[in-house]
Image: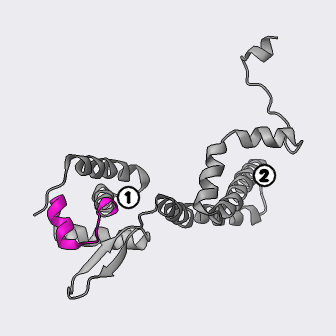
Amino acid sequence: METLSPLVRSFVGHFGEMGSRWGINRTVGQIYALIYVSPRPLHAEEIAQQLEFSRSNVSMGLKELQAWRLVQMRFVPGDRREYFEAPHDAWEVFRTLAEQRRRREVEPTLSMLRNALLEAPTTEADRVAQERMKGMHDVIELLMTWFDDVQRLDAATLAQLMKMGSKVQRVLEFTGKLKPAPAARGTSEEAA
């Protein structure tokens, strides 16, 4: 049985801890991390041995990772076992995670908000609630439109855009497409 190096063990352990914060359980996070850093596809028995998990836990974790489209099954010629590998491109992983989170979390929220906005308010409290829901709906819709645009960018362009950070705001201000943001309270500009 191959043992994990301290480097890989640390990465796998961290992903397990983070997994619970991202909506997956620790076992699934650790399975994914091991597959992601592996130089070759792994079969379920190897994963179970290296992580010291039961074969059934590994099997369930692999099914969940396949449902999230984070691992793919591969076949090795001359071997009947199923092997698993993860995309090696971090941008592809990020895009897949973002799309899956959108499908599982954002779209149901938008659907609920759309339905709520179709209702006729019967009280002043309902009117206020609906007004606030409309604001939330509009922000989420705007973000999803932006998300769709970003998803179409190639990795190099996306990385370049992200490196620009707040420089984009300055370009928009310079071209007159965006007004400068008001100074935050308590800044030196306010005191002047």
The quarter holding residue 73 reads bottom left
Q: Where's the C terminus, which quadrant?
A: top right
Task: Left or right? Give the position of 39 relative to 66.
Answer: left
Q: Is residue 48 magenta?
A: yes
Q: Position of residue 121 (x, y in %)?
A: 77, 58
Q: Looking at the picture, does residue 44 appear above or below residue 138?
A: below
The residue that appears at 62% across and 45% down in the rendered structure is: 163
Q: Nearer the viewer, mark 1 or mark 2?
A: 1
> Is 17 positioned to the left or the right of 178 in the image?
left
Q: Earlier in the sequence, mark 1 or mark 2?
A: 1
Residue 116 horizontal/vertical position (percent): 70, 62
Instruction: Write down the residue under mark 1.
Output: 24
- Quarter location, residue 153: bottom right
- The residue singled out by tag 2 in the image is 127
82 left or right of 119 in image? left
Q: Amino acid at mark 1?
A: Ile
**Which one is nearer the viewer's eye here, 60 or 82?**
82
Q: Nearer the viewer, residue 71 or 126?
A: 71
Front-lying residue, 24 or 65: 65
How many neighbours does mark 2 have within 10 angstroms: few (below 14), some (14-19), or many (20 or more)?
A: some
Q: In percent of the image, x 53 and y 62: which residue is there?
A: 95
* Bounds of the magenta segment: 36-53
